[in-house]
Amino acid sequence: MPHIALVTLVVRDYDEALSFYTGALGFELVEDTDRGDGSRWVVVRPRGTEGTGLLLARAKDEAQAASVGAQTGGRVGFFLHTEDFAADHARMTAAGVRFLEEPRHEVYGSVAVFEDLHGNRWDLLQLA
């Protein structure tokens, strides 16, 4: 097994999530297929990569809706690597991404925690 292909992220609305991930984060839309039952198969991933993507899955019931934004129990659950921390931090801030802290420069690299549109926590990280 060479890599994890997809990670599911439960969202409120497909189009709202697509707007955030492709607009504010600059991800690319890989697939958006109508499944014929009111659901869609929506996959995004960081632009220019062939690695792991996010499957944006609309909550189907109350239990799933309750998990939106809290899928990792309030911990940072997603790690977005960058090759230009300052530029990506500035671009994301200008796009309205909410950072929870000022950038930190640690032994392992530069990092800042941000929230996605639902409140899931992410690290923007440039390794040293």
Image (cartoon, rainbow, N blue to C red):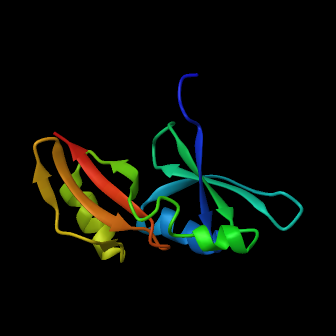
Q: Which residue is located at x 67 percent, y 67 percent?
A: 64
Kindly give the residue lying farthest to the right in the view shown. Answer: 36
Q: Residue at x 16, y 41 (%)?
A: 108
Q: Position of residue 47 (x, y in %)?
A: 46, 49
- Left/right placement of residue 53 relative to residue 79 reads right
Quarter residue 99 falls in: bottom left
Q: Is residue 93 above or below residue 52?
A: below
Would residue 99 be found to the left or right of residue 27 on screen? left
- Return the x and y of residue 67 as percentages of the image width and height: 59, 68
Direction from residue 76 to residue 127 in the image, left or right: left
Residue 97 against residue 1 in the figure, above or below:
below
Measured from the top left, where is residue 103 in percent x and y?
Answer: 17, 62
User: In the image, what residue occupies the spot 24% across and 67% down?
Assistant: 90
Q: Tell which of 47 and 121 is nearer to you.
A: 121
Quadrant housing the N terminus: top right
Residue at left 17%, top 51%?
110
